[in-house]
Image (tube, rainbow, N blue to C red):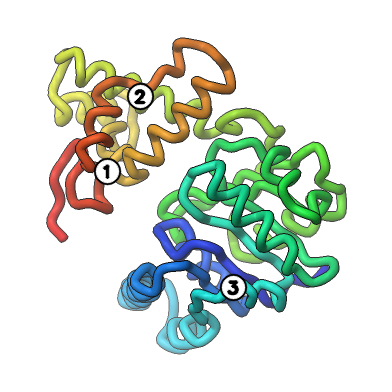
Amino acid sequence: MSIERMAVIGAGTMGNGIAQVCALAGLEVTLIDVAPAALDRGRSTIEKNLQRQMTKGVISEVERATALSRISTTTDSSTTSKSDLVIEAATEDVNLKLRLLRQIGEQLKPGALMASNTSSISITQLAAATPCSDRFMGVHFFNPVPMMALVELIRGVQTTDSTAAAMTDFVRRIGKTPIAVRNAPGFVVNRLLCPMINEAFCALGDGVASAEEIDEGMKLGCGHPIGPLALADLIGLDTLLAIMEVLYADFGDSKYRPAWALRELVAAGRLGRKTQRGVYEYQA
């Protein structure tokens, strides 16, 4: 199936990033969210990102303007009935995702594909909530979407070969590199990355070193471009906690237990860059 028109559910950091790269690749994109304010923020973020890319010479003024013209926003989820592909990029809450996927799946046109950008939840479980489970896949982008080259493609038990082939072609068309991943908690990258970040919070909570020293140690000692605690702020501490809770529940292994220091910051509403305060403080 040729994918020319698509919808992205959720206008947050991941959703607006996905919309941006797809529009730049020539797709017509509808960005959908229940909150008008979230759509305004998402559109504003896309405009700023495209302007930054143009200033750096990555894209031209014509490409910037054309990409923006391809993106429409709405609170009406029924518009997904016109899409060849719908990508769900809502908050990492399994019940919310199941409800959204069930509703949207009933509205899809025949043959349309559906995907979730979940970072850890079972694709088989999510697919089962839809009436099109054979045309459903995990399509896990990484933050920030415009910059990160990788996309994990995760098949559920129900996913057909033709769906996997179509999604692989789609990912390559938008300039990303796909890797095929078996459905398992955390998939590949987050199964390795998030426990490492969680351990950094354990070290912070134990007073082993300051946040700055932990991050500096991993940058200089391991060659990481960004320290684990600063990366946690970028990801969102609530998202990190949700991933660790999925790993802990699904594997039943204490090595995945979320760090208390992480739980405390989330409980305080200090979620990272998106709230201007997490492990570190940021200016708006």
When asked about the image quadrant of residue 226, the answer is: top left
Residue occupied by mark 1: 271
Give the distance between the C-alpha atoms of the residues marked 3 and 1, in whole angstroms.
32 Å
Rendered view: 106 above or below 69: above
Q: Which of marks 2 and 3 is in front?
A: 2
Who comes first in sequence, dot 2 or dot 3?
3
Residue 272: % across, % down? 25, 44
Amino acid marked by disc 1: Leu
Q: Mark 3 points at which residue?
A: 25
Residue visible at 80% across and 55% down in the picture? 132
Q: Name the residue under label 2.
A: 198
Give the mark nearest the N terminus, 3 or 1: 3
- The tag earlier along the polypeptide, 1 or 2, is 2
Horizontal side of 214 relative to 256 (left or right) equals left
User: Residue 81 location, x and y as percent?
Assistant: 71, 74
Tell me which corner region of the image, top left, top right, bottom left or bottom right, holds residue 41. Answer: bottom left
Report the side of 133 relative to 231 (left or right). Answer: right
In front: label 3 or label 1? 1
Q: What residue type is labelled 2?
A: Asn
Residue shown at the point (24%, 24%) measured from the top left: 261
Type of amino acid under label 3 = Ala
Q: Nearer the viewer, residue 168 or 100?
A: 100
Q: Nearer the viewer, residue 176 or 155?
A: 155
Is 236 drawn above or below residue 64 in the view shown?
Answer: above
Residue 262 percent location from the top left of the image: 28, 28
Q: Is mark 3 on a helix, strand or loop?
A: loop
Secondary structure at badge 1 equals: loop
Q: What's the CA distance linking mark 2 and mark 3?
A: 35 Å
Residue 203 vs 229, above or below: the answer is above
Quadrant in which the N terminus appears: bottom right
How far apart marks 1 and 2 lie (CA) works out to 14 Å
